[in-house]
Amino acid sequence: MSCDPVISINGLGKTYYVYKRPIDRVLQSVLRNRKKKYREVRALNGIDLDICRGETIGIVGRNGSGKSTLLQIVSGTLYQSEGTVSKQGRLTALLELGAGFNPQFTGRENAYLNASIMGIPRSVMEQRFDDILEFSGIGQFIDQPVMTYSSGMFVRLAFSVAIHMDPDILIVDEALSVGDVGFQSKCFRKLRELKEGGTTTLFVTHASELIVRHCDRAVLLDDGNIKSLGEPMEVVNEYQNLLFGTDRLPEAEAAQHEQDYPTDASGFISRTDMDGCPLRATYNSSEYRWGDRRGVIQDYVMLVNGEPATGVCSTGDHIEVKVRAVFQQQVDNPIYGLTIKTADGVTVYGANTRDRGVSVEQGTPGSIALIRFSFTADLVTADYFISLGLADEDELKDSIAVDRRFDLIHLYVSSDHMDFGIVSLNMDIDRISSA
């Protein structure tokens, strides 16, 4: 496609020098290059990227991948070690919370100060101020020192000021994640308006669905390198595999791996004396687990439309989760449950064998139980986490946790439609001809 680049990044690199002690900085200035008192940490490696006028670029990557460093260099608040960055037009950046505002000044004073720095005449700022205040929604707090603001109030004002500076380039680094859902929606509507006016936007987020929904292209950074650049959905899928997937083993090593951990006819790891869950492609290593462990959720098998799950599925796919529990001690009244939550912890759905009236056997020492959950992924594009639980029904306490594995499984659901919310209602929208 034809591209009128407003940002050109060529051979960009950044190296940080980390000292063990503050005094080592002084010693290094005396010793020069005769002896190194620091270690080098490479944050960016030869980044090449052209960003077109009016384009919205989303940047994703694991913590420490170089996302914020890249945005800081582009915005001019950090110098690169090598390479060049050329920009055309007025750039406004909304980086880490607090950047660019004096905490002692009021919201009004900070707004005028930022406008002055950006070269906006005071007379023009006076005309725009009411719009800034209305968009931020902070009301009378505008004349209070920003040090008294909550994080939500702060980002409301900072974003409102930024978008009213006539930016040709707008850079946002995770700041919108602080605001409430309603304000985030309002911000993205405004970003679409700016895009229609030719504004180029770069933003960093960990929310994959925002990348798919709002970006023309996406960039995946990993260890300071561009690992992937292209269509948002393709880049997000690669990002999910990087976060939660398993790397493909060389053929010889894979054969040895299969020999070490063979599976049975149902797909479970044959060995029941080990935790098979971490071997699964959909396993989330950040799971939270607790219980008295009289029995354990020892392994699970997840299928999407009958095929082994990779961690990514489409809206409407059939999901099957088979669970194997192994008992070390007596559990008289086992309860098996599954819960689906959004990435920010909102429960989408949950069910268990007790409430469904499913008859299950007692868990006796050395026994094994197999449970299957199946459902349709009628969910909109987003990240979801599946929790599995084993409990023991108790007359006094309702249930006693035996082995609860919260956020055990990660699943990214994608859709051809950019619907919003949580569940997919398979809505049809048709135009009705007038009579």
Image (cartoon, rainbow, N blue to C red):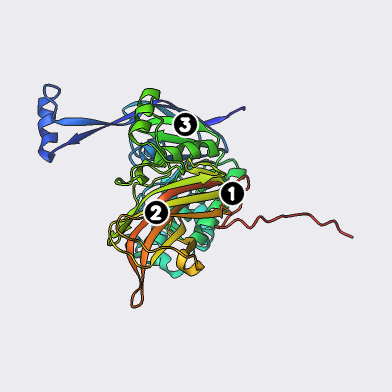
Q: Label 1, label 3: how many angstroms apart (C-alpha)?
A: 24 Å
Q: Residues within 10 Å of mark 2 (few under 14, many from 20)?
A: many
- Up the image or down, 246 lies above or below 381; here it is above
Q: Position of residue 427 (x, y in %)?
A: 68, 56
Q: Give the residue pinned by disc 3.
A: 228
Left or right of 316 on screen, residue 145 = left
Q: Disc 1 marks which amino acid?
A: Thr
Q: Give the residue pinned by disc 1.
A: 315
- The mark that comes first in sequence, 2 or 3, is 3
Q: Position of residue 298 (x, y in %)?
A: 35, 50
Q: Label 1, label 2: how many angstroms apart (C-alpha)?
A: 20 Å
Q: How many marks?
A: 3
Q: Nearer the viewer, residue 242 or 377?
A: 377
- Discs 1, 3 touching: Cβ within 8 Å: no
Dividing the image into 4 quarters, which one contains the N terminus?
top right
Q: Nearer the viewer, residue 281 or 230?
A: 281
The kind of secondary structure element at disc 2 is strand
- Say which quarter of the image contains residue 217: top right
Q: Give the residue pinned by disc 2.
A: 407
Residue extending furthest toward the right: 435
Q: Disc 3 marks which amino acid?
A: Ser
Q: Residues within 10 Å of mark 1 (few under 14, many from 20)?
A: many
- Up the image or down, 148 lies above or below 12; here it is below
The kind of secondary structure element at disc 1 is loop
Q: Disc 2 marks which amino acid?
A: Asp
Q: Which mark is residue 387?
A: none
Q: Position of residue 312 (x, y in %)?
A: 51, 43
Q: Is residue 224 visible?
A: no
Left or right of 327 on screen, residue 231 = right
Dividing the image into 4 quarters, which one contains the C terminus?
bottom right
Q: Nearer the viewer, mark 2 or mark 3?
A: 2
